[in-house]
Image (cartoon, rainbow, N blue to C red):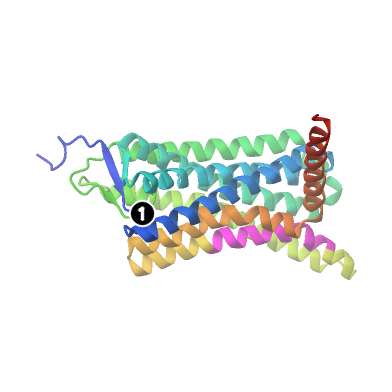
Amino acid sequence: MEPGNDTRISEFLLQGFSETPELQSFIFGLFLSMYLNTVFGNLLIILAIISDSHLHTPMYFFLSNLSFVDICFTSTTVPKMLLNIQTQSKAITYAGCITQMYFFCFFVVFDEFLLAVMAYDRFVAICHPLHYMVIMNSQFCVWLVLICGIITATQSLLHSLMVLRLSFCTDLEIPHFFCEVNQVVHRACSDTFLNDVVIYFASVLLGGFPLAGILYSYYKIVSSICGISAAQGKYKAFSTCASHLSVVSLFYGTSLGVYFSSAAAHNSHSSATASVMYTVVTPMLNPFIYSLRNKEIKRALRRLLGRETRKRSIVCDSKP
């Protein structure tokens, strides 16, 4: 009989970062503040885009979707970690772990596809400006997002079903702060060859394909910008994609850095700490990057916040 075939586990244990009480309090406060900044920052971006008719364009449609995905991406992992710290528990149910793993895989790949779609949008806007509104019509933009969602949902479901076929024995401690698919797979005591193959090919195809699309789009964008004779025209063309390029660099720079550093160090705890960069820090910084580098977003945010301030003053003045 294979070991673990008769064992039905009920939960995993997430080791997190530290068991020291003083550090636990610090980690709780740090992650809570980063999570709140992520949620409120991305919500402001979404509300600013919805409330300003000047931002009802393909570029900002994709940006609002990216902000929504970033909120969901962070919400998949951080609240459970905060709850475990607060209750001084490491446990996550088997069903909860599979669910968390599914949504993490879904949102991280959705993020990559949205960044690729946004790069394509900038490519069409700069390289084919006369045909931009014809190509990037509202129906096509919605279909792009839906197709990205279907692809990411399919690959996430595949990972989850592949994990469900595994048997687990006594090593149920996951050296991470969430149920990362590779860590869960390597806790199994049954054969994980098929899982490793699926993880490898999914990483190469669904990680490499969007990155290749982004690199190609920006290669064509840079070539097109270099052909512009006026310096002011070059600056205006580059400024329209500077924010997106910053976000792409931050996301892929941190995620690839985590991948290569963990592969070199073979240290799960180091990988968990480094994963914070692209799972928590990057979604938190994205609203700041777009609001600081984009004049239209800053203008929309000022209008939105100014409107809310006026509403509050009217309500206060109307009170007896």
Q: Quick one: quadrant of the N terminus?
A: top left
- The quadrant where residue 7 appears: top left
In the depicted view, which residue is nearer to us: 196 or 23? 23
- Residue at x-position 78% and y-position 53%: 298
- Residue at x-position 79% and y-position 35%: 316
Horizontal side of 233 relative to 210 (left or right) equals right
Q: Position of residue 15 (x, y in %)?
A: 31, 53
Magenta span includes 250: yes
Magenta residues, as a range? 236-253
- Residue at x-position 65% and y-position 39%: 144
> For the residue marked with disc 1, what is the amino acid?
Gly
Q: Is residue 213 above or below residue 304?
A: below
Q: Position of residue 167 (x, y in %)?
A: 22, 40
Q: Is residue 215 above or below residue 190?
A: below
Magenta span includes 208: no
Main SS of the magenta part reads: helix
Give the residue number, with chain letter if any, for mark 1. 16
Horizontal side of 84 relative to 71 (left or right) equals left
Q: Quick one: quadrant of the C terminus?
A: top right
Q: Position of residue 64 (x, y in %)?
A: 68, 43
Q: Secondary structure at mark 1?
A: loop
Q: Position of residue 212 (x, y in %)?
A: 59, 57
Residue 45 appears in view:
yes
- The quadrant where residue 68 appears: top right
Which residue reaches farthest front?
320
Horizontal side of 78 relative to 62 (left or right) equals left
Residue 66 appears in view:
no
Q: Is residue 292 above or below residue 151?
A: below
Residue neighbourhood size for the residue with mark 1, other residues' Cα within 10 Å, grouped as few (<14), some (14–19), many (≥20)? many
Horizontal side of 223 relative to 173 (left or right) equals right
- State how many labels appear: 1
